[in-house]
Image (cartoon, rainbow, N blue to C red):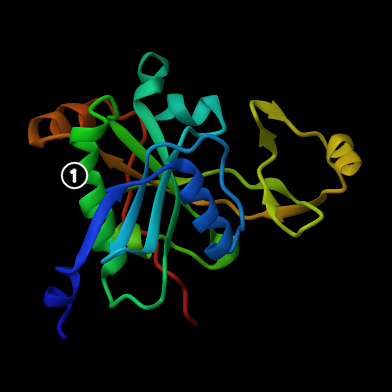
Amino acid sequence: MGWRSERMKYKVELIPAKLAKEFVRTHHYSRGCHNGPAPCYGLYDNEELIGCLVFATPCSENVRKSLFGPEYKDNVKELHRLVILDVTPKNTESWFIAKVLKRLQIDRPDLWGIISFADKTQGHYGTIYQATNALYCGTSSKATFYLDKDDRLRHPRQNGVNISLDEAKKRGWKPVKRDAKFRYVYIVGNRKEKRDRKKLLLLDNYDYPKENKE
C-alpha cells in the first residue's frame, strides 16, 4: 500500500495530557515529559494510539520572550515531544506535524509561535523540522542537565525553579553536559497572520544545519 493510501486511515485527535505523558514515558528516549503539557495530540490507526505530539510551556521565561518579546510571551509554546511508533510508513512524522499545526489554528488561536529544539547530543539535527519548513533560528547555549536515579533526563529548571548542583546531589541526580541545541520555530495562523507574525519575530533565521557525515 502506498503512502498516500496508508495515511488515509490515520486520524489526529486532541488527547488528555495524562494519556500523552504515559505514551511519551513509554516510547521516548528521555522517558519524561513536562508537567501540565497542553495541548496534546494523538495519532490513531483506527482506535490504536500510534503517535503523540505534545506542546508545553517552555521552562525558561526568556525562551517564551525570545520569539515576539515579553508582551507576547503567552502566545508561545514549545513542541516538547514528538513520538511515533516504527510501524508507520516514511513521512508520517511530517504529515502529523502539518496536520497538528493546522488544528492549532482552530483549537488554540491564541498561539502564534511554536519553538522546538533538536538535541545535537542525541545526534539530532532537526531533519523533521526542516522537512516541514520550520524556520531555523540558530542554537541555544550549552547546558548542564541531570540524570535522576532512574536515568531519566531532567531539565535544570523544574516547576519554575533552577536546580543547583547541591540540590541535584540531594535528589540523587547526576550532572551531564549537553551540547547546544538547534532551535526551530513555526509561525502559526492563516496566511495573513503568519506574514504579520513573522515580521514580529525577534530571532534571526539561517540556512538549515547539515550533519557532517565524514
| Image height of 134 relative to 77, above or below | below
**Residue 133 can be seen, yes or no:** no
Q: Nearer the viewer, residue 51 or 131?
A: 51
Rendering quarter of residue 149: bottom right
Looking at the rendered image, the quarter that the N terminus falls into is: bottom left
Residue 177 percent location from the top left of the image: 72, 54
Is 55 on the left-hand or right-hand side of 163? Answer: left
Q: Which residue is mark 1?
A: 102
| Image height of 210 relative to 61, above or below | below
Residue at left offset 39%, top offset 67%: 210
Residue furthest to the front: 47
Kindly state the secondary structure of the residue where label 1 is placed.
helix
Q: Amino acid at mark 1?
A: Lys
Q: Nearer the viewer, residue 207 or 62?
A: 62
Residue 75 percent location from the top left of the image: 34, 25
Residue 135 percent location from the top left of the image: 30, 47
Residue at left offset 47%, top offset 49%: 19
Residue 62 percent location from the top left of the image: 52, 26
Is 101 on the left-hand or right-hand side of 127? Answer: left
